[in-house]
Image (tube, rainbow, N blue to C red):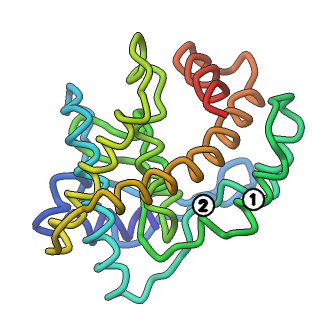
Amino acid sequence: IEALVNREFSQHPVLGKYVARGLVDKPIEVKLDGATKYMVVQEDVSTNVGDPGLKYWLKAAAQLQVYGTEIMDRLGNYHPALSLTKEKDEARVKDSGIIIDPDIRKDLKDAGIENQLVFIHQDLRAANREGIKVIDWGHAGRGNPYLDVARILLDAQLQRGRPFTEGDYKQCISFFLGERNKALKIEGPTVAEVNRGYQEFKEISLLYAEAQSAYLVSKGNACSVEERDNCEFLISQI
């Protein structure tokens, strides 16, 4: 999926500024320690420095979803994004020692809130944003659009010293939906749409916080200082 995104999105008149240009049409198969791996080759974006800010990334998420979905529809690609509730995640959450409400998790999983037709990055956290570019599309596919928003907003560094209130989250969601609607060439969002978006955001955020914090707990001492901070922050959101 990463090679496809690099090739198709980098050529798009809007998405090109967000996505590194792919230098190969298909992943290159390599053997490492007896295992088959796939490698993509793309332009070097490591010279991009500085974070363009929260609104830039919310707008990027909205435009990548709208135009990315159009591109993938045209290509007939309906590959799902990586799930937050796959068997490995369920085992991690169970073994992590993190206190969760298993009934709420089961209800959200059974409701299929991840199973949507919007094309998303899925892992749009700070580590996968390099300058003005979005990198590492290996988890991308069809999924819940608010997961990209959650990956941006549920960040310890972003909220350091000033935790977001419900009003802050709704303001961000209103901006995200406004940029989405501009790309779709429709009006809005209405207050009702923002409130509905906030509810969807809270639901997918809970699954994300549980899965990501459990993953970081499983890394133990291999976590960086930033990862430990984010783990503590995500646990506080559960």
Left or right of 89 on screen, residue 42: left
Callouts 1 and 2 close, C-beta under 8 Å: yes
Query: For numbered disc 2, what is the local secondary structure?
Result: loop
| Quadrant (top left, top right, bottom left, bottom right) of the C terminus | top right
The disc at residue 237 is: none
Left or right of 93 on screen, residue 32: left
Residue at 15 percent of width and 53 percent of height: 17
Query: For numbered disc 1, what is the local secondary structure?
Result: loop
Based on the displayed image, in which of its 4 quarters is residue 131 positioned?
Answer: top left
The residue furthest left is 13
Give the percent coordinates (x, y) of residue 141: 49, 68
Left or right of 218 on screen, residue 145: left
The amino acid on which the numbered mark 1 sits, given as a three-letter code, is Lys
The disc at residue 86 is: 1
Residue at 74 percent of width and 27 percent of height: 217
Please name the residue that numbered disc 2 is placed on: 82
Near mark 1 (Cα within 10 A), the count class, few <14, some 14-19 or many ≥20, is few
The residue furthest front is 192
Q: CA distance from mark 1 to mark 2?
A: 8 Å
